[in-house]
Amino acid sequence: MSHVKFWSSTYKLPVAVGPVLALMIAFASTPSFANSLQTQSFIGTAYGTSAYVGNSVLIGQTAPVTLGGTCGTSQQPLNVPGTQAGVNLAPLVTGGAVNTDVSDSGQTAAASADTVTVSLLGGLIAAQELKAVSTTTMNPDGTINVSAAGTAFSGLTILGIPYGGNVPANTRVDLPLLGYVVLNEQTFHIENAMATMTVNMIHVHVTLGNLLGLQVGTEIVVSSATSGIVKVFAPAILNGQAFGTEVDGNLLASTPTAPAILPCLGTGGHYITKTLGTLSLPGVLSSGTISDAAESNLTETMSSGQTLSTVQGLNILNGLIKANVMLAQVNAVANQGGQVFSAGVDRFIGLSIAGHPEIGDNVPYNTQVNLVGLGTLYLKRILRTNPPTHSIEVRSLELQVLENNNYGLPIGLDVIVGDAQLNLIPAANP
C-alpha cells in the first residue's frame, strides 16, 4: 500500500501565531477511485426567496436544497426536494410559498424553484407563480450544455403593468425612485471541464433612497435554481472555504466575512487570499484584521488542498470573550491509490472568557463551555463526515444562544469565528 506524506505549506502565517499543534484526523482508506483518475461531480442548488444588504441577511433562503457543497457530489442518482410556506416581512416580501428540487442522474444535473403568490416592495411587484429551472447536461462527446427550458412567469405585474409568461432572459425594468429589477436573470459559465447555470426569476436592486425605508444596496431574489457539472482528471475534486465570522439567526444574521473560496477546478497550488481590516457587528462582536486563504492542486496522481483563517483582536459581547489571535487551518490529500488524509489545526493566543479562568490558550479540542444565562460556547471545534464525501471543518469559536439573555440576542443565534473547511469529492464507484 502506498502512502502519502502530509506536507508542510509554504504559506506564511502571521509571526504572532508561531508554531501550531496539529491534530491529525485520518479517514479510512477506500478503493473508490483506485481504478480511475476521472472525477465527475453534479451541482444543484435551489431556494425560494432571500433578501440581503451587504453581509447582512434580511431574509434567509427559503426551502434551500442542495446536492452537496459548491462543487456538488459524485453520487447519483440523487433527488433532494424542499418546501416552505411564505414569509411576512413587509415591505420586502409577503407570501411566496415555494417548492424546490435538485437532482442528478446519468449525465444530467437539474434544479428548480417554484414560488407562488408573492408580493414584493409593498405590492410594486406581484406574481401568481415564478418557476425557475436550470439543467446541465454532459454530451457523449464530453461537451457540456446548459438550459433554462421550463422557466416561466404567471400573473406577473410590475407597477401595475402585466408581463407575459415568456419574458426574455435578463430583462431589466426600472423602478422609479427605488432602483431596478431584473427578470429571468440567467448567468452561466461554460468551459471544457465545467459548466454551471443560475436562473433567478426576480432580482431586485435598491439603488436609491426611497419612501419604503429600504437601505440602498438591498437586494431581493425570488425563485433561484443553479445546476452544473464538473469533470477533472484527478483522484478527487476539492472544494471549501475559509472565513472570519458568520452570524446565523432569524432576526440577526451576517454572511461570511472575507471568504476565500476554492474553485472546483483548483488553483494550481496558488493561494486565494482575502483580508478585512476591521469588523464591527454591533451588539455582537468586533475584531481587528481578518485574513483568509485557500489553495488546491488537482493532478492525475494527487488532489491536495488547504484553507486557513486568522482573526486578530476578537471581542465578543463587550469583553465576555476575547482573543488576540485565532488560527484555524485544514489540510486534505487524496492519492491515486484511493487513500484520503486530512488534518485540522487550531490555536489561540490571548484567549480569555469572563467567569472562566480555567480556559486559556491551550484549551483542548472540542471544548464546550456552559455560559450561564446565554448558551453554549464551543472552542477548537472540529466537524467531519465520512464517505461518500470526506469533509473536515475547524471552527475556532462557536457561540450558540440557547437562553433569554441580558445581551438582547435572540434564542437560536449561532455565531462562528475563524472557520476553515474542505470537502473532498472522490470519483464515483466504477
Image: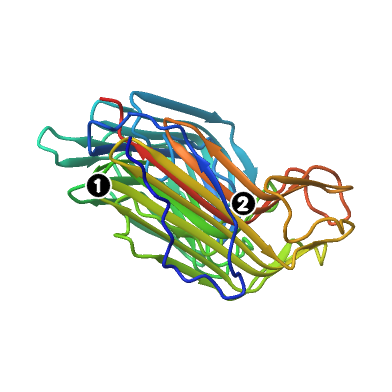
Q: Residue at x 80, y 42 (%)?
A: 402
Q: Residue at x 46, y 27 (%)?
A: 81
The dot on residue 272 is none
Q: Identify the amino acid type marked 2.
A: Arg
Considering only vertical position in the picture, is 300 above or below 210?
A: above
Q: Residue at x 72, y 64 (%)?
A: 285
Gap in angstroms between the C-alphas marked 2 and 1:
30 Å
Q: Residue 125 at x, y = what percent?
A: 49, 49
Along the horizontal axis of the image, is 4 left or right of 370? left
Q: Secondary structure at mark 2?
A: strand
The dot on residue 194 is 1
Q: Is residue 411 visible?
A: yes
Along the horizontal axis of the image, is 16 left or right of 275? right
Q: Which residue is mark 2?
A: 395
Q: Identify the amino acid type marked 1.
A: Met
Q: Residue 118 at x, y = what percent?
A: 52, 40
Q: Residue at x 37, y 46 (%)?
A: 4
- Rate crowding at label 2 as few (under 14), some (14 to 19) or many (20 or more) other CA atoms within 10 Å: many
Q: Residue 287 at x, y = what percent?
A: 67, 70
Q: Is residue 163 visible?
A: no
Q: In the rendered structure, are the residues bearing label 2 and label 1 in contact, judged by CB atoms less than 8 Å apart?
A: no
Q: Earlier in the sequence, mark 2 or mark 1?
A: 1
Which quadrant holds the C terminus?
top left
Along the horizontal axis of the image, is 369 left or right of 200? right
Q: Quadrant of residue 215?
A: bottom right
Compare residues 209 and 9 and report the one nearer the observer: 9
- Rate crowding at label 1 as few (under 14), some (14 to 19) or many (20 or more) other CA atoms within 10 Å: many
Which of the colour schemes (rainbow, by chain, secondary structure, one colour) is used?
rainbow
Q: Nearer the viewer, mark 2 or mark 1?
A: 2
Which quadrant holds the N terminus?
top left
